[in-house]
Image (cartoon, grey):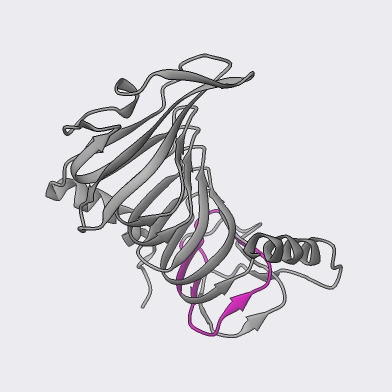
């Protein structure tokens, strides 16, 4: 039912000529708590430092997608995004509450911080980074030299990596297919390659454990190799020293330049 609703929403958005994106490109901070029958674009043609910042709060809603370019930032502290979030450049997305219904993506050195709320999916590419310590994420995929670091929260579906993508799992008591894992272990060393489709191979298994914030992890994973070539891609178990905690907060503080 939810997928049918999303499909109808996307069709209405992309084929409705009356839907125009709200564009903000002034380097200022904006708080949004109302409904827009449109999407949102931040700094699409204006590479300024600091970039434009938006704080989306309870009551704020965008029918279309949210696009971040260059050095723009957004804090999603409530409200709803009916479509998706797309981040590129040095932009930063921080989600602490609210609902993002569509399949979102981050690319080109952008940073995503998920602290709470519900996000349907995030796909990462081109050196993007995602740090997750809370909330719920429908699914996570990493490729193109991107990294995802998961230390808390809940992921509903598969973890997928390919094409030099890495997912780091921060916590304790991890096992893959019943085998105990230690810090530094790569999941690719514990599962065999199986042929899935004619165009690619994959390693598939189930990873369980306890994330750093105490929540349980129990997910299937897919490590993909296109055309049978083992391009580096993996899911790696990491410990929880203070240095990793600081690393996870690095992207988060990039956007905290305004109060």
11 or 17, nearer to the observer = 11
- Snapshot quadrant of residue 145: top left
How many marks overall?
0
Residue 74 belongs to the span the image colors magenta: yes
Kindly give the residue lying farthest to the front in the view shown. 178
120 or 164, nearer to the observer = 120
In the rendered view, would you say 77 is above or below 66? below
- Snapshot quadrant of residue 64: bottom right
Q: Is residue 101 visible?
A: yes
Identify the residue shown where x is 32% and y is 61%: 253
**Residue 90 in picture, x, y percent from top left:** 47, 51
9 left or right, relative to 249: right
64 or 221, nearer to the observer = 221
Q: Quadrant of the N terminus?
A: bottom right
In the rendered view, would you say 229 is above or below 142? above
**Residue 153 in picture, x, y percent from top left:** 33, 59
Q: Quadrant of the C terminus?
A: bottom left
89 left or right, relative to 116: right
**Residue 46 in picture, x, y percent from top left:** 61, 59
240 left or right, relative to 163: left
In the rendered view, would you say 78 is above or below 197? below
Q: Is residue 69 visible?
A: no
Identify the residue shown where x is 39% and y is 60%: 114
Q: Which residues are magenta?
A: 50-77
**Residue 101 in picture, x, y percent from top left:** 58, 64
59 or 111, nearer to the observer = 59
Residue 116 belongs to the span the image colors magenta: no
Identify the residue shown where x is 46% and y is 65%: 118
């Amino acid at each position: 039912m939810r997928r049918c609703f999303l499909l109808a929403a996307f069709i209405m958005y992309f084929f409705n000529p009356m839907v125009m994106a709200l564009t903000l490109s002034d380097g200022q901070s904006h708080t949004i708590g109302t409904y827009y029958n449109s999407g949102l674009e931040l700094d699409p043609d204006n590479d300024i430092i600091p970039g434009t910042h938006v704080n989306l709060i309870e009551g704020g809603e965008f029918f279309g997608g949210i696009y971040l370019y260059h050095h723009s930032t957004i804090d999603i502290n409530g409200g709803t995004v009916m479509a998706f979030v797309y981040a590129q450049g040095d932009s930063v997305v921080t989600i602490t509450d609210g609902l993002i219904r569509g399949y979102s993506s981050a690319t080109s050195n952008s940073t995503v911080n998920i602290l709470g709320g519900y996000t349907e999916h995030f796909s990462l590419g081109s050196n993007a980074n995602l740090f997750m310590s809370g909330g719920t994420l429908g699914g996570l995929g990493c490729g193109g030299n991107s990294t995802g670091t998961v230390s808390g929260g809940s992921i509903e579906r598969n973890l997928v990596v390919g094409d030099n993508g890495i997912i780091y799992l921060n916590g304790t008591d991890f096992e893959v297919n019943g085998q105990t894992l230690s810090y530094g272990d790569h999941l690719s060393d514990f599962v065999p390659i199986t042929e899935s489709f004619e165009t690619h191979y994959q390693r598939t298994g189930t990873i369980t454990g306890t994330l750093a914030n105490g929540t349980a992890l129990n997910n299937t994973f897919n490590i993909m190799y296109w055309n049978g070539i083992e391009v580096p891609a993996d899911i790696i178990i990491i410990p929880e020293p203070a240095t990793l905690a600081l690393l996870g907060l690095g992207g988060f503080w990039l956007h905290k330049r305004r109060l």
